[in-house]
Image: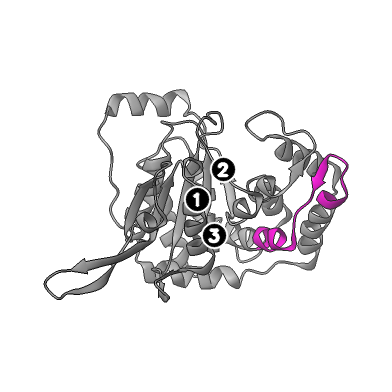
Amino acid sequence: MSSTGAEGIERLRAAVSSVIHGKEAVIELTLVAVLAGGHLLLQDVPGVGKTTLAAGLARALGGSFARVQFTADLLPSDVTGGAVYDSSKATFSFRPGPIFANVVLADEINRTSPKTQSALFEAMEEGAVTVDGETRPLPHPFLVVATQNPYDFHGTFPLPDSQLDRFLMRVAVGYPDREAEREVVRSGARRMVPEAVMTLEQVLAIREQVRQVRVAEAVEDYLLDLVRATREDARLLRGVSPRGAQALYRAVQALATVRGRTFAIPEDVRTLAIPVLAHRVLPRSHGGPTGSGGADALRQLLDELVAPG
C-alpha cells in the first residue's frame, strides 16, 4: 500500500476517534466496511454513539451525510425521493430523497414497513434508485449505516435473512469504558465535529489498493474451511452462502489495508468471522433476543479449526 494511502487511513481513524472515545475496535471495523465497499448494521441499545459514529465518519470522509428516522408510517418515497409538481413550470420534477448521500444513517431500520425496507435495500444492492421508470445512480462512495435495538421488539418488523445478508457486517458498539465515559459526561451535550481529512477521490483510490491485497492460498483455504464448517455443523441449521464467503474475503483484504499490510494473514479471518458471518447463519439455539447463537457457534468453530502457519 502506498504511504499516502496509509497516512489517509490513519488520519481518518484519528478523526473518527475524536468524536467517539474508547471504541477503537468498532472504528476499525467501520473503516473496513468503508474500504470494502459494504454496508454496516449497528445492533445496540440507544445512546451509545451510533449516530455520532456515522455523522463523524461522513464529515471526516469529506462526503455528504443524511439521517432517516425509520417509523411505521415512513413511505418508500420518503427515502428515495419522488416527483414533485413545479407550479411555475406546470411540470413534475424529481426531488432526491435522503438516500442520495455518501453516508446514510438508517436509524431503527426495523421499525418501518417491509415495503420501505425493500426500497432501501434495493438502493443498497444496486447503488441506484428507480423512480417512475427512470434509474438514478447514487453517490460514490455510498455507505448505509443502519441501527436497530436488539432488545425492544414492540412495533418492529424484523429484517428477513435475505435483507440481513445485504450488510457486510453486524457490529455492537457497546458501552464505553470508565475513562471514555468520563470524557462523555464532561462534554455534556456538546458534539464534536471532525474536519474532513480525506477526499472522496482518495477513498476510491484506497479501495483500488484493497483489491490488490494478496491473499495466500493457505489463508483462502482457512477462510473456505470455516465457511464449509458452518454448513456441516450440527449447531447451525443454515450455514454461510457463497455471497457470505465473498464478503468475508473482501473484508479480510480491507482489514489488511487498514492495518498497513499488502497481504492478508489468518488473524484477519479470525477477527472478522463473527462481524461478517454471525448474521448470515441460522443457529439451532438463538441465544435469546440478542441473536448470539450464531456468534457462539462461530467462536467454537474457530477454536476447532487449525489456522495455517
Residue tagged by mark 3?
A: 38
| Residue 234 in magenta stretch | yes
Q: Residue at x 86, y 42 (%)?
A: 304
Q: Is residue 15 visible?
A: no
Q: Position of residue 53 (x, y in %)?
A: 40, 44
At 48% across and 42% down in the image, what residue appears?
147
Q: Quadrant of the C terminus?
A: bottom right
User: In the rendered structure, which amino acid carries the disc numbered 3?
Assistant: Gly
Kind of residue sitting beneath label 1: Thr
Marks 2 and 3, how far apart in space? Answer: 13 Å
What residue range appears in magenta?
A: 229-249
- Residue annotated with mark 1: 30
Q: Quadrant of residue 183?
A: top left
* Residue 107 visible here: yes
Answer left or right for 28 relative to 73: right
Examine the structure image and report whether residue 185 is included in the region drawn in magenta. no
Going by the numbered disc 2, the residue's amino acid type is Val
Q: Earlier in the sequence, mark 2 or mark 3?
A: 3
Q: Which residue is mark 2?
A: 171
Contact flag, marks 1 and 2 (Cβ < 8 Å): yes
Label 1: few (<14), some or many (≥20) within 10 Å? many
Question: Residue at coordinates 43% horizontally, 51% vertically from top-left?
Answer: 13
Q: Looking at the image, do the residues carrying marks 1 and 3 touch, with CB atoms under 8 Å apart?
A: no
Label 2 with label 3: CB-CB less than 8 Å = no
**Disc on the earlier residue, 1 or 2:** 1
Mark 3 crowdedness (10 Å alpha carbons): few <14, some 14-19, many ≥20: many
Q: Position of residue 39 (x, y in %)?
A: 52, 56
Label 2 environment density (alpha carbons within 10 Å; few <14, some 14–19, many ≥20): many
